[in-house]
Amino acid sequence: MNQYDVIVIGSGSANIVLDAALEQGLKCAMIEKGRFGGTCLTRGCIPTKVMVTAADYIREIDGLSKIGVDVAPASMNWETVSRRVWQKIGESNDVLAYFKAMENLDVYQGTGYFTREKVLQVALKDGTLSEEFTANKIFIAVGSRTNVTSFDGLEEAGYVTSETLFGDKYPKKPYKSLVILGGGPIGTEFAHVFAAAGTQVTLVQRNTRLLIKEDEEISAQILKDLRRLGINVLLNQLPIAVRLENGEKVLTFSDKITSETCEVRAEEILLASGIRPNTELLHLENTSIITDSRGWIHTNEFLETNVDGIWAFGDVNGEAPFRHKANYEAEIVAYNLFGEHKQQDWRWARYDLVPVVTFTHPEVAHVGLTEQQAIQLGYEIVTAKHHYSSTAKGFALGFDPGDEHDGFVKIVVDKKTNAILGIHLIGPQASILLQPFINLMNAGETKLTPINEHIASKAVKELRASRMTRYLDPHSVKSIGETMTPHPSLSEVIMWVEYYLGGKH
Ligand SMILES: Cc1cc2nc3c(=O)[nH]c(=O)nc-3n(C[C@H](O)[C@H](O)[C@H](O)COP(=O)(O)OP(=O)(O)OC[C@H]3O[C@@H](n4cnc5c(N)ncnc54)[C@H](O)[C@@H]3O)c2cc1C
Ligand SMILES: NC(=O)c1ccc[n+]([C@@H]2O[C@H](COP(=O)([O-])OP(=O)(O)OC[C@H]3O[C@@H](n4cnc5c(N)ncnc54)[C@H](O)[C@@H]3O)[C@@H](O)[C@H]2O)c1
């Protein structure tokens, strides 16, 4: 059996760990079943933001006459936007070429799975099976995919997901009409894109509000803002059936409270109904790796699984599913295991300050607790709101006091200590305005907080017993490197300073 030092499964955030292992001259294997570069590059953050940025400009141009700039109405050139989308997706080939050229690395193109504890095999793309192989260290970063929630007639009618939209179902031109099921980040971002492209969009949300992980006031504002863009938003609706009629898909929804039904017709259906982990392909039943009932792998604050020598990070561990969170975890693993740091200097993951940005229109961003969460946790809080229109630049941008679409910031503060518990923004460039708060809230001393305490290697037991703290000096460039920057916000231009200086690990 082939013996490696390191195996990584998945080529998204796992690349960070693989690079660090290769730098150490270790013998490595990488397994990837799809396009190299993972979800973010090939069907997630990056292609969507190429579209969103074009859509943002269309909306901004629409509002320019208010501040004294007369321009003809803008429209989306789908061909150009699509060319730029596929240019980025095509970079997947560069990622593959980069790794194929690496000495010390075997690249397996196919679906990897465990045949027994720490032993893997790959169903290769050419239809053959690889030999079994193993490694001292195995890293699982297989990500997630759309959780298709089916209902009567769906398979016959057909639908797209973010995976197939950036695959064989990519539309040659914007749909005439589109029903999006799901009012989370994917649903609201695509609603913005297609509405700006001229599609008649209906956004249907099962919940009582959009973006349910946001503060309630933000959800209420984005509802008004999306409706103002001409998007038909239906809340509290369950899809019960779909049929084909005259080439259109006719969906029936039932109101969750009144049970009243309504119908919506559209050329296409986009499912944006949440995600599930890509773990069933791994045949974890042949291992003792613990998952929850939905298949998300349990990990501790050092990203260890319960099996010695196997780590899991990124979407697959069920913590916040964002690219910057996946990178943050991969960097922690690389730092601890391949960075030649003493055990007492190891970094650990914390999830209380994961920044969240939804690139819909306008942008929505937050870090920390919502007002409701802070109250539930027993804090005595004060909150404050400030509108864009109350600032000179906000007025210059065209916001007047009382405008229904006026953006705002809402801050949640611990009354006793004055500590910032959470900050929430909705409005232009919210993703950039958030960044100073992310850095501020991360600065200072953090205590190690165990996660999934039942997962504890010898090293982790020692570290937990030593009651570790980590100090992020607000003056140090290193602190920036240990703090997340929402991906792909423009703040990334300035926040990757540690990389410019070199010697990341
Ligand atoms: C439409 C969309 C937009 C998004 N926008 C944003 C955004 O703006 N900002 C943000 O932060 N996040 C965004 N995300 C989320 C982000 O893409 C993910 O959080 C991130 O890519 C997860 O990285 P990962 O390394 O965990 O997994 P992935 O990048 O998904 O990598 C996992 C890889 O493993 C491969 N794989 C799976 N199973 C196997 C197997 N058995 N054998 C071999 N290979 C396997 C997969 O093919 C995949 O390439 C978006 C997601 C979507 C779907
Ligand atoms: N900008 C970003 O960072 C970004 C962008 C896109 C996606 N993502 C990540 O990808 C993950 C998946 O995004 P998502 O929006 O699919 O998931 P989500 O779970 O955040 O939201 C899905 C929403 O769809 C609703 N829903 C579920 N089934 C439905 C149905 N049949 N009909 C109508 N509504 C239904 C749910 O109530 C939920 O509110 C997110 O958790 C996010 O972390 C991030």
Image (spheres, rainbow, N blue to C red):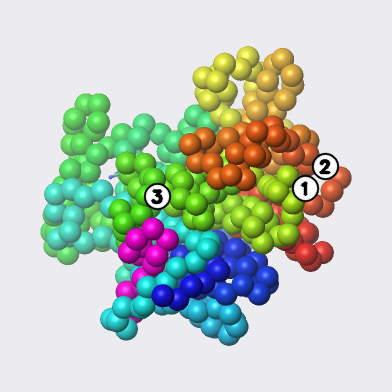
Residue 2 sits inside the magenta stretch:
no
Q: Is the magenta stretch mostly helix, strand or loop?
A: strand
**Residue bearing the label numbered 2:** 473
Are the residues tagged 1 and 2 within 8 Å (C-beta)? Answer: yes
Q: Is residue 49 left or right of residue 78?
A: right
> Within 10 angstroms of label 1, few (less than 14), some, or many (20 or more) residues?
some
> Within 10 angstroms of label 2, few (less than 14), some, or many (20 or more) residues?
some
**Residue at the image point whose x is 78% and y is 35% from the top:** 444
Q: Is mark 2 on a helix, strand or loop?
A: loop
Mark 3 / mark 1, whichever is N-terminal: 3
Q: Which amino acid does label 3 sit on?
A: Ile
Mark 3 / mark 2, whichever is N-terminal: 3
Residue 290's image quarter? top left
**Residue bearing the label numbered 1:** 479
**Residue 304, x across and y down, in percent:** 53, 49
**Residue 22, x across and y down, in percent:** 63, 72
> Within 10 angstroms of label 3, few (less than 14), some, or many (20 or more) residues?
some
Q: What element carries label 1?
A: helix
Q: In this view, does 204 lie above or below 105?
A: above
The reply to whether residue 105 is visible in this rendering is yes
**Residue 312, x across and y down, in percent:** 49, 53
